[in-house]
Image: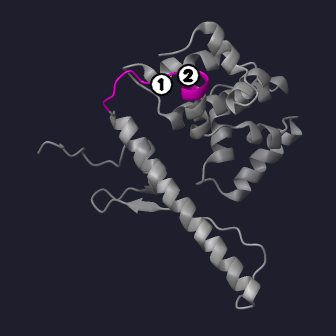
Amino acid sequence: MARSDAASSAADRDPSCKLGRVIEEYDLDGVAGNLPNYWTREDERYSLRGLADYVNNAILRAAMDRAGLNPLDGEVENTYRLLTDDEVSEGVRTQAHSRLDRDGVDVGAVEGDFVSYQTVNRHLKECLGVERASAERTDSDRAEGGAQRIAALRNRTVAVTENTLDQLRSSGALALGEPDVYVDVTVTCTDCGTHATVEELIDDGGCECEPTDAKS
């Protein structure tokens, strides 16, 4: 159950909540008002990751509007993809940064204001007191839980790798500058040939194969 309108409004502007600060800074009251409904409605529910992308697109649009860019239909979404998609090359990402910089958008500040799905989750549950009514886990919930478990394992792999490299470097067993470790997990379906990162596969709801009937 959500809090009263007054309590929710106060929580939206709680300086300890990043999303609340971003809502106020970019004047995103309309976007903020949609979040509880988009997360709890019965049809076409957003995942927490989808809500984070929704907020981040709104942040980018507001920043581009303030710079007087008047982005065309689809331009904000494509620019956001260029800034955040792991499949985008560094060269293309740099070009997107440079173009926004030339047009008067502080890209570093905008990217610093982008929110994660964890931030959205805390905002909904801790600031607004919003919970999904049904105790039954939806397919979206299960997929999101799986993505979170994989992300946790990937982050641990990065941490262990960085620590091991640091120990080897400190002991003189390895000549290495400052390492930047990145771990990606890709999946290939041997039936249809789809090749994607595990995040893309989960976000897209799978590959091109027909769903398996869980009851069969």
Magenta residue span: 124-136
Mark 1, secondary structure of its residue: helix
210 vs 29: above or below? below
The residue nearer to you, when weighing 56 against 91, is 56
Give the residue drawn at x 78%, y 78%: 177
Relative side of 12 to 34, left or right:
right
> Which picture quadrant has residue 162?
bottom right
Residue on which disc 2 sits: 35
Residue 125 visible, this angle: yes
Between the residue at mark 2 and the residue at mark 1, the CA separation in whole angstroms equals 6 Å
70 vs 180: above or below? above
Residue on which disc 1 sits: 39
> Which numbered circle lies on residue 134?
none
The residue nearer to you, when weighing 75 against 172, is 172
| Residue 213 horizontal/vertical position (percent) | 17, 43
Give the residue drawn at x 63%, y 29%: 55
Please name the amino acid that badge 1 sits on.
Answer: Trp
Mark 2, secondary structure of its residue: helix
